[in-house]
Image: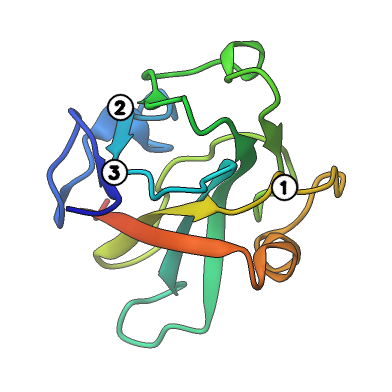
Amino acid sequence: MGLSLTSTAFTHHGEVPHRYTCDGNDSSPALAWSGMPAGTQSLALIVYDPDAPDPAHPQRIWVHWVLYNLPPNCSGLKEQIAPQALPLGTLQGVNDWGRVGYGGPCPPIGRHRYFFALYALDTMLPDVGKPSRLQLMQAMQGHILAQTELVGTYQR
């Protein structure tokens, strides 16, 4: 079956509920995953919007959340998870607001897509501080066993 990622908050390609956006509580949705490939030593999760600032004329990827070194025995994250409640060993990177943690959808114009990308890795990554999405992608290079994504949409 392979690596899969779901949420009780929204379906794949479905609308991200208001409470998980900057217009609501700006809290992270519950996520669940399964189907870890053999040899998985850690997981990474990157949440991003490839439609910034305008889906009709995207200019950049806007990063909403960066997590890495999630333990392979972890099967998900609860809704509105606090940093201290993240699974033991999990490290966070910086989002495009320049802070650590989840920042919900907050599109300036149009309907944007939000990719919750999960990666199964064959290693525990070294503590690379608070990496950006690109820095984490570099660190993961050559270590990705499997990846999957859950896509939600939102328009203000």
Q: Secondary structure at mark 1?
A: loop
Task: Classify 10 Å Cα crowding around label 2: few (below 14), some (14-19), many (20 and above).
Answer: some
**What residue is drawn where x is 72% and y is 70%?**
138
Q: Secondary structure at mark 2?
A: helix
Residue 25: percent from left, percent from top: 40, 23
- Please state which of residues 89 and 94 is positioned toward the viewer in this rendering: 89
- N-terminal of the two: label 3 or label 2? 2
**What residue is drawn where x is 66% and y is 29%?**
90
> Are the residues tagged 3 and 2 within 8 Å (C-beta)?
no
According to the picture, the residue beneath numbered tag 2 turns out to be 19
According to the picture, the residue beneath numbered tag 1 turns out to be 94
| In the image, farthest residue toward the front | 38
Q: Secondary structure at mark 3?
A: loop
Q: Callout 1, which amino acid?
A: Val
The correct choice, above or below, for 67 with respect to 133 in the image is above
According to the picture, the residue beneath numbered tag 3 turns out to be 35
